[in-house]
Amino acid sequence: MARLYHVPLSPFCRKVRLSLAEKKIEVELIEERYWEQDPDFLRRNPAAKIPVLRLDGIMMSESAAICEYLEDTRPEPPLMPADPEARFEVRRLISWFDDKFHHEVTSKLLYERVNKKVTGEGYPDSKNVKAGAKAIKYHLDYMAWLLDHRRWLAGDVMTLADFAAAAHLSCLDYISDVDWNRSAAVKDWYAKIKSRPAFRSILADQISGFRPPAHYADLDF
């Protein structure tokens, strides 16, 4: 069986988990306290980053590279379109969420509110929290604009771009940092994607010291 070294509230780990589940690849989830720089973990990934996936006798790191490997070796069901222009758009949006959204929102809200406590790095920086709370509004509006023109974020079919976005938003939803009333289109999109069987294990996550809101695991909000 595959092994995924992860932490539950990591959007990068969740993106890989969603890809594995969608492709029906059984995986053993192993929580990794990566911040402790354990020698065994450093041997698995000298960069000391999660996720790390052991699959096909290979130890893989970097979520984007892992997802591309899964797509290459387990092409069904496809999470990347065949058309080069459409593939570009999926990759562009993955980068949007894993780079821009992560820097402007996830790192300012999730990392300040949760990661600092878990890793013992101190208290949240209120300036960062305020900046993240302001920035997420812009990103939700951009998603609403995309969904006004498309059935899914990157086009007419669900792709890895949707999983990348849902991975970030699900982490933030766990700590009640997403205003789902800002856009009916975004709320409907998230309800649709979190109703997929691939989302079940994510909605079952429980983080010690943090209780999710009642709607977190409610498929009908």
Image (spheres, rainbow, N blue to C red):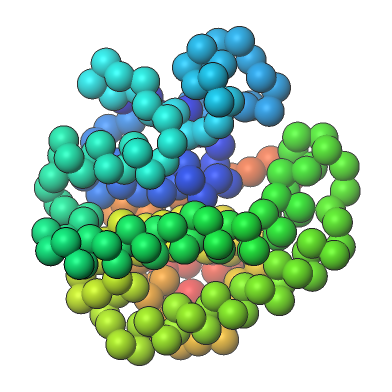
**In terms of depth relative to the viewer, which is nearer, 139 or 114?**
139
Is residue 24 visible from the viewing direction of this image?
A: no
Q: Position of residue 194 (x, y in %)?
A: 39, 63
Residue 120: x and y in percent read 82, 35
On screen, residue 83 versus residue 147, left or right, reads: left
Relative to 97, residue 144 above or below = below
Q: Is residue 160 visible?
A: yes
Q: Quadrant of the N terminus?
A: top left
- Examine the rendered structure and indicate whether residue 44 appears above or below residue 66: above
Q: Is residue 21 left or right of residue 117?
A: left
**x then y, percent, for residue 70:** 24, 39
The residue sitting at 86% across, 63% down in the picture is 126
Would you place residue 51 above or below residue 37 in this image? below
The picture quadrant where one finds residue 61 is: top left
Q: Quadrant of residue 57?
A: top left
Q: Residue at x 79, y 42 (%)?
A: 117
x and y, in percent, of residue 196 in the image: 30, 60
Q: Residue at x 38, y 82 (%)?
A: 146
Q: How many marks?
A: 0
**Which residue is at a point 55% across and 26% down the rendered structure image?**
47
